[in-house]
Image (spheres, helix red, strand yellow):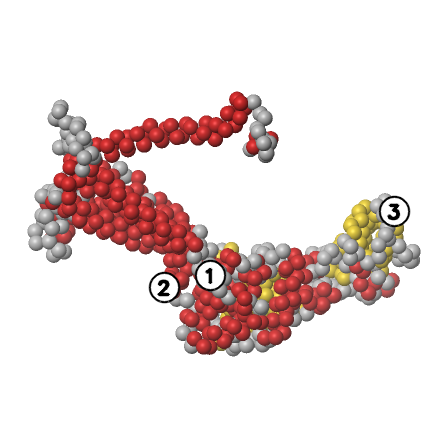
Amino acid sequence: MASIDIKDVRKAYGSVKILHGVDLTIQDGEFVVLVGPSGCGKSTLLRMIAGLEDISAGEIKIGGKRVNELDPKDRDIAMVFQSYALYPHMTVAGNMSYSLRLRKTAKEKIASAISGAAEKLSLTPLMERRPKALSGGQRQRVAMGRAIVRSPKAFLFDEPLSNLDARLREHMRGEIKKLHQDLGATSIYVTHDQIEAMTLADRIVAMNAGIVQQVGSPLDLYDRPANLFVAGFMGSPAMNMFEGTYRATDGAPRVELGQGVTVALAGPASTADGARVTLGIRPEHVVVGKNEPESIPAQIDLVEPTGFGTILHANAFGSDVKAFSLERGLAARGDTVSVSFPVERIHLFDTTTGSRIG
Amino acid sequence: MTEAVNAAPYGRDRRPFLRRLASASEPYLYSAPALILIVTVMLVPLVIGISYAFRDITLLDPFSGGFIGLDHFRALAKDKTFWQALKNTVYWTGYSVALQFCLGLILALLLDKPFRGRGLAQALCFLPWAVPSFLSGLNWAMLFNPIVGPIPHWLFGLGLMDAPDNLLSSPDHAMWGPIIANVWWGIPFFAITLLAALQSIPRDLYEAAAIDGATPFQRFRSITLPFLAPTIAITVMLRTVWIANFADLIVVMTNGGPADRTQIVASYIFTTAFRRLDFGYASAIAMVLLALLLVYSMLIVLLRQTLLRER
C-alpha cells in the first residue's frame, strides 16, 4: 500500500493538449474515482500513473518515490482493463500466476497466493479453464484476481465494468467495494458512469477537457457542485438549469427568470446586481402541486414513470422543468400545476465563468 | 427449405413426381456449374496426367503410348538425378522458407510499430511480390554475373570469394543464387500475412503483460507467438508447397546446372517433360512429388488444428 502524489502533470500529443496540469494527492488506502465524459483525459491520467503513457510534464510519486522514468513493471501497481486483457492461451490459474512466475516467485508461494485470490473471488472451480470458456462476469473476476495476487502498492481500474450488462455491473460494483474494504488497497478507478463514481468512491475527481473540475466526497459533489459542469454531470435525471438575471436591490436577493417569474434566494450571491446567472435545482427538489406564494404555474408535457418514482416534464416560464417524485399519479399530461423551488435547495452559478456563486 | 417442411414427414410423399424430382435435384443443380468447371479443367487433366505415369509417352516416338505398369517408378528408384534433385529440393525449400519466414517476421514486427512514413514503407516493402518471378530471376542472374553485375565484386571485396566469379556456376554454391532471389521475392508474402495477424492482437494484452513485468522478449513469447502460431503454420505450409513446386527461378537462373547441382524435382519434371519430351516419366516424378507434399500438408493441417484448439 502507498499514497500517490500527482504534481502538475501534463500530457500533450504534439500540439494537442490532453491534460492541463493535474494536482492530486491520494492517501494510502483511499478509493479515488476519476469521472468525466469521454475524452476528458481521465484514462490518459490513469495510464500515465501505470506507466503506459509518457508524462509530458510534472511528476508522479508512488509511495513517495518518483516514478516518471520507471517502467510499468517497476512501479508495483496492478491494472484491470476494460477488455480484461486476459491472456487467451493461459488458463485462469496461468493468467493469475503469470506476474509471479515472471518474478521467479517460489512455487509454493504462487500456489498459496492464487488459491487465496481464487477463494476471495469464488474462482476456485474455474482455475483450469481458459478465458474463452468463461462468462463476462467471470472474466472480470479473473482480471481482478490477476491484480490482487501480487499485493501491489496500488490498483488501477480502467472502466472495468463497461462491458458488462446492467445487472452484472451492479453486482460487480458491490464486489469491488467489498474487495476494497477487505484489502484496504489504494485504488484509482476510472469511469464515465456517475452512479459507479458515487457508490464506490471515498473521493471523486470530476474531470472535463483535461482539467480537474472538483475533488471531494461523493455527497460533496452532489450537494455542492463547484461549477456548472459538475452540477450537470452528477445526478440522474440531470439538474435543471435556468439562465436569468441576478437582482440584489432592496435587500432581497432574487433571480429573474423571464416571463415575469422571479425566484427568491436564501442569501446574497457573490456577484453584482444585474449579472447573468444560472440557477440550478435538482429534479427531486422541485416541489410540484403545492400552492405556495412562491409557486410558478406550469403545464405537464411528459410523464415518465420509472417504477421507483416518476419524472415529470413541465413547461414553465418558457423552459422545461424536470421534477422527480416518489409519488405516483401526481399529474397527467396536459394538467396545469404549480412548481416551486425551495430556497435552501437552489444552486447559483455565474453563467459566463460557470463557477458557483451561491 | 420450405419444400422440405411441406413434405409429409410420415408415409408416402403425395407431391407430383416432377415436383419431387425438382426439389431433390435442387442442390445438385445449384452446384453444377462450379462442379462442371472443376471437373473439366482440373479433375480430367489430373486423371489423364496420372494415367501418363503408367504409360510410355514420348512425344517424338510415334509408336509410344502403351501401358507399361510400374516401369517408370522402377526406373525412378534407380535414377541418380532424381535422388539428387530430391535432396536439392529439400535444401532449396528448407533454406528458402526458413529465410523468407524469419526475415518476413522481422519485417512484419518492424512495420507493426508506428513510425513516420509507415504507409509508404509498407507499400515499398511489398513491392517485390508484384514483380513477375521470371523477371526477378533474370535480374538476379544479371546481378550475379561478374561482367554486368556488382555482387561478385562485392563478395570478392569482402573477402568472401577468392575471385569475382559467377556464383551460379560454382558447383558447391550455385543453389544459393536462386535461394537468395527467392528469399528477396518471397519475404513480402510472410510480411503481409504476419502483419495482418499481428495487427489483430489486442494492444491491451501487451500493456497487461508490461505491468505484469514481462520483458519485450517474454511478451513476444507469451503473447505474440501463440497468437501467430496458427497463421505461421498455414503460411509455412503454403509456402513450402509452393516453393517445392516453384521451378521458375531455377530454370531462368541456372537451368538446373552446373551438372544438375541446382536441379530440384520441379525443374527436373519441367526438363524431362518439355526438353526431353518424355511425358510419361515426368508424370511419374510429379506423382511422387504430389504424394510427398500431400503427406507434409496433412501433418501441418493437424498441427494447426491443435494450435487453434488451444486458443
Q: Which residue is mark 3?
A: A335
Task: Say which amino acid is labelled 1.
Answer: Tyr
Q: Quadrant of the C terminus of chain B?
A: bottom left
Q: Which residue is mark 1?
A: A87
Instruction: Give the camera-side residue of A293 and B21.
Output: B21
Q: Quadrant of the N terminus of chain B?
A: top right
- Cα distance in 3D space between marks 1 and 2: 16 Å
The reply to the same-chain question for discs 2 and 3 is no
| Within-10-Å neighbours for mark 1: few <14, some 14–19, many 20+ | many
Task: Say which amino acid is labelled 2.
Answer: Phe
**Res B110 visible:** yes
Which residue does the image show at 36% across and 49% down from the upper left? B301
**Res B273 visible:** no
Q: Chain of mark 2?
A: B
- Cα distance in 3D space between marks 3 and 1: 59 Å
Q: Position of residue A320 (x, y in %)?
A: 78, 49
Give the side of residue A115 with respect to residue B252, left or right: right
Which residue does the image show at 50% across and 57% down from the upper left? A132
Task: Say which amino acid is labelled 3.
Answer: Asp
Q: Earlier in the sequence, mark 3 or mark 1?
A: 1
Which residue does the image show at 41% across and 27% down from the upper left? B33
Indicate the secondary structure of the residue bearing disc 1: loop
Instruction: Give the camera-side residue of A95 and B37.
Output: B37
Q: Which residue is mark 2?
A: B217
